[in-house]
Amino acid sequence: MTGQAANGSLAVELRDVRKSFGKTEIIRGANLIVAPGERVAIIGPNGAGKSTLFNLISGRFGATSGDILLHGQKIDGLAPYEINRRGLARSFQVSNLFVRLSVAENIRCAVLWSLGYKYSFWKFLADLRDVNDRVDEVLDMIKLHKRRDVLAMNLTYAEQRALEIGITIAGGASVILLDEPTAGMSKSETARFVNLIREVTVGKTLLTVEHDMGVVFGLADKIAVLVYGEVIAFDTPDQVRANPRVQEAYLGSVLADQQAAAAGH
Amino acid sequence: MATTSRSYYEFKPYNVGRWVVWGGYALVMIVAPLLWSSSLSLTMLSQMGIAVIACLAFNMLLGQGGMLSFGHAVYSGLGSFFAIHTLNLVSAGKLALPVSLVPLVGGLFGMLFAVILGWVTTKKAGTPFAMITLGVGELVWAMSLMFPGFFGGEGGISGNRVAGEPFLGITFGPQIQLYYLIAAYTFVCTALMFAFTRTPLGRMLNAVRDNPERVEFVGYNTQYVRYVAFIASGLFMGISGGLAALNFEIVTAEVVNALRSGAFLLFTFLGGAVFFFGPIIGGVLMVVALVLLSELTQAWQLWLGLVFTFMVMYAPGGISSLIMMNLRVASFGKLRPLIGSYLALAGTAFTVLVGAGAMIEMVYHLQLNQALGPQMKYMGATLNAKGLDSWFGAAFVLVVGIAMFELTRRQFVRDWGTAQEEIEKEIKKREALQ
């Protein structure tokens, strides 16, 4: 893949990143260090800036100040497509598909650049064996092989979420950002989906925003807790769970809620 | 299941269906002038080829890229002007270029202007894109009035397509010779534009249409995708313009104006922007409407407006989508029960048309042909445009027609719904069998 650059022993690094919308500062000096192959879950209360952080890393918005590094190279200020070409791909909280194209074409669109076809209009898609093999491979991974010719807009919700992940991983990016991949899914679907995510991100660096604590503790090597635009804790799940600041700021109430909900059933 | 795993490699070694379709397309173009050989039909057929190329090129943006251009006549029009000037250079013996290649000069300049102007327009998408194309269109139109040396002012620039050395006795003097040149260009351009839809860039253009934001996150610069598509479209628009220059042997400034741009939009839409072949229908309709309909009635633009409005409201996919919907029904063997409904719909729609037509024609007659008196001929009957009985009669036919149409329409909607439900069931059954 994109490989480790000169001082790129880190996959992603944020140094004192700040972002303001007008006078409101949403991200207030976030710091984060993610090693290659690590799975990091970002948690925090609503409005803490989790999605904004993803938008900054993936280039959707520019940071107001601070540095964002991918494999040791600065990427802040680059356009999303430039960041993607350097090996970072992201999914969206609300499925963001090519709705009038079939499932297979959705994946194909996500594969083309990474295999070097760029803006080619002198080759036929049907002849691109490497692209089509990769499409088959991804369709197998996300288990949508049987639905390959269905238009994306006609898929069920869970299928759309799977396709969302498929588009994200298809280009072979080494760093994957998943924004609430299991949002809106039932418990059994979520469990299956966590397995799917684990399978398709083997050997990759994974950052995910997630509300479901079951998913977080099941998936993550490390957890970053984001509260009011700052990373207040960044550690292994056990350590984070035990951290009194986290308990106070966020986790205590969430766990209490989830336990109460579980007890209620 | 064995076949489905490879089913999307569209280019099978011997794809019979594809050969039949393209062979049929070529055959129609070869045979058409033998069936309709009058000079009017030859001119019309030639214009159809030209319009088909233009509408297909326009649809590269509209249907495939989601770009609504209000000023695309700029590229065909400038192509026309450069082609006619080139032709005049050939006539004057200053340039040794076969006349058959003059349309390519038009294409080259269409492309060149798309490179320059498209760089500005494709910086934006959506409504801003449409606005900028409108602005650029007005700009070029204004320029055409400012430089009479190049654009020929009111009279335009004329030329003579019998120029240079004839090749194998072909001078392009007779219309039939030019027709076959246009047909050859039309076939090749159609094939090239179809091929474009099957390439990586063509597919990414669809992706940009559907979801430009996501395209940025799979490595593509959306603006660049739009730009390249715009240039390709400009090339084919220019070729179409070059062929028009040869066909009419005169080019006036109106070829770059907003009316022409609007015609491309209107007929591409009528033909249908969703399917590749829609604009082919659109191009043919364009000539039929502009040449035949305008002969038939003075109110042709009003009729065209009505058809366009109904199409946008009830069949936004255009004629091609109506065809494809019915083919789908037919492929499941459900079309036969609908035929009765279709005949009833056609009959009642015709009644509405007769009634509305009589009233529209009477209004036009009163406005435009006052000198001829109130009597007028309409579909074999004599109407008195100032007589109450004529108006009452027309209104009666119209109202009865509308009422009957509405009744048959409701029945049709039910039948259509039933057919669709049965098809859905059939599909489910087939999926279960796999």
Image: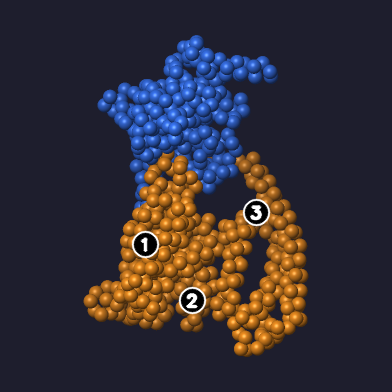
Chain colours: A blue, B orange
**Chain letter for the residue marked with disc 3 in the picture:** B
Left or right: A39 in relation to B406: left
- Say whether marks 2 and 1 touch (CB < 8 Å): no
- Mark 3 or mark 2, earlier in chain: 2
User: Gap in Å between the C-alphas at discs 1 and 3?
Assistant: 41 Å
Left or right: B244 in relation to A261: left
Q: Quadrant of the N terminus of chain B?
A: top right
Three-letter residue code for mark 1: Leu
Q: Quadrant of the C terminus of chain B?
A: top right
Does residue A53 sit above or below B88 in this rendering? above
Q: Residue at x 47, y 69 (%)?
A: B259
**Chain letter for the residue marked with disc 2 in the picture:** B
User: Gap in Å between the C-alphas at discs 3 and 2?
Assistant: 37 Å
Does residue B363 sit above or below B21 in this rendering? below
Q: Which numbered disc covers residue B235?
A: 1
Q: Secondary structure at mark 3?
A: loop
Three-letter residue code for mark 2: Met
Circle nearer the viewer, 3 or 2: 2
Whether residue B182 is visible, yes or no, is: no
- Mark 2 or mark 1, earlier in chain: 2
10 Å neighbourhood of mark 3: few (<14), some, or many (≥20)? some
Q: Residue at x 42, y 80 (%)?
A: B175
Please give the residue where the numbered disc 3 appears in the rendered image. B332
